[in-house]
Image (cartoon, rainbow, N blue to C red):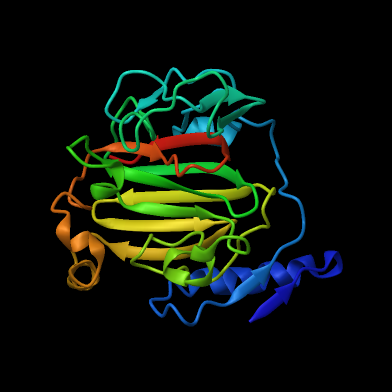
Amino acid sequence: MLIKENPKTTLSLFAVLLVLGCAGASSDPDNTPEIELHDPLTIMTPPNQLTEEETAEGFELLFDGASLHRWRGYGCDRVPAGWTATGGTIAFAPDVEGEPQDPPYVCGDLITRETYTDFDLRLEWKVNSAGNSGIFFGIVENNGPPYESGPEMQVLDNDGHADGKNPLTSAGSNYGLNAPSVNTTRPAGHWNQARITRQGDYVEYWLNGLNVVEYKLGSPEWRQLIAKSKFADWPDYGIHHEGHIGLQDHGDPVWYRNIRIRRLD
């Protein structure tokens, strides 16, 4: 299904999107409809600031547009090489000239200094052509990389990266396990709005205003998916209620902004 946005039919499009959003997530990786959105992302407030409504709801900023003081590297107590606060974004640039690069999975990915249990996380991301990154939650620092414990919402240029050809690894997916119910991704170089909520074992992923993935950690369906995946060999995967939020260094440039979170516990 392809829906092209027309300024003269904004209300009609909104109604269609609302219906799609209520339809829930698809578990069929070969049946992911697509929504084509060419309009620029509309920001109602300046980036990296809370609205009055968000403040009243209890949201807090994880990034103020200038400092990474609420973040550190996975497995270390400093900001990893390549990650900077620049231009009002948290940016990753591989192979920063003059800076030593950290070994893979050792102080490479960026994680929050605090841990979270139930939460509502909202942020925006942007990648270049063929770019790849990810947003983790429930991370614990064991002897393996972050993805061995934390489920991941995929961040990807669907059109330019090979993973975009498989809905299970496309943007907005619960990486490798749950395909998004609809492809709402904006093209490379454009901002995408992402949201992850967790309440108990129930998790939802939202991308550009639509609920695209839903799953229940530890459920029979979850265990079946895990058993048939590479995650079956990682005993820490998805079992920790409390953990860090993480942004992935996948070796490609990526930008994040407007990162805010509300505790739901």
Q: Position of residue 10 (x, y in %)?
A: 77, 65
Give the quarter of the image for residue 102. top left
Instruction: Identify the residue at the far right of this view.
Output: 8
Left or right: residue 140 compared with residue 71:
left
Instruction: Identify the residue at the far left of this view.
Output: 235
Left or right: residue 135 compared with residue 146:
right
Q: Position of residue 88 (x, y in %)?
A: 64, 26
Give the quarter of the image for residue 50. top right
Please report the residue visible at 47 percent of the width from the left and 71 percent of the height from the top: 167
Q: Is residue 118 visible?
A: no
Give the quarter of the image for residue 142. top left
Classify 256 as above or below 22: above
Left or right: residue 117 compared with residue 30:
left
Classify 137 as above or below 233: above
Q: Position of residue 234 (x, y in %)?
A: 17, 54
Number of marks: 0
Q: Quadrant of the N terminus?
A: bottom right
Please report the residue visible at 22 percent of the width from the left and 66 percent of the height from the top: 226
Please report the residue visible at 44 percent of the width from the left and 42 percent of the height from the top: 121
Please report the residue visible at 22 percent of the width from the left and 38 percent of the height from the top: 140
Q: Is residue 31 visible?
A: yes
Q: Quadrant of the C terminus?
A: top left
Q: Position of residue 123 (x, y in %)?
A: 53, 41
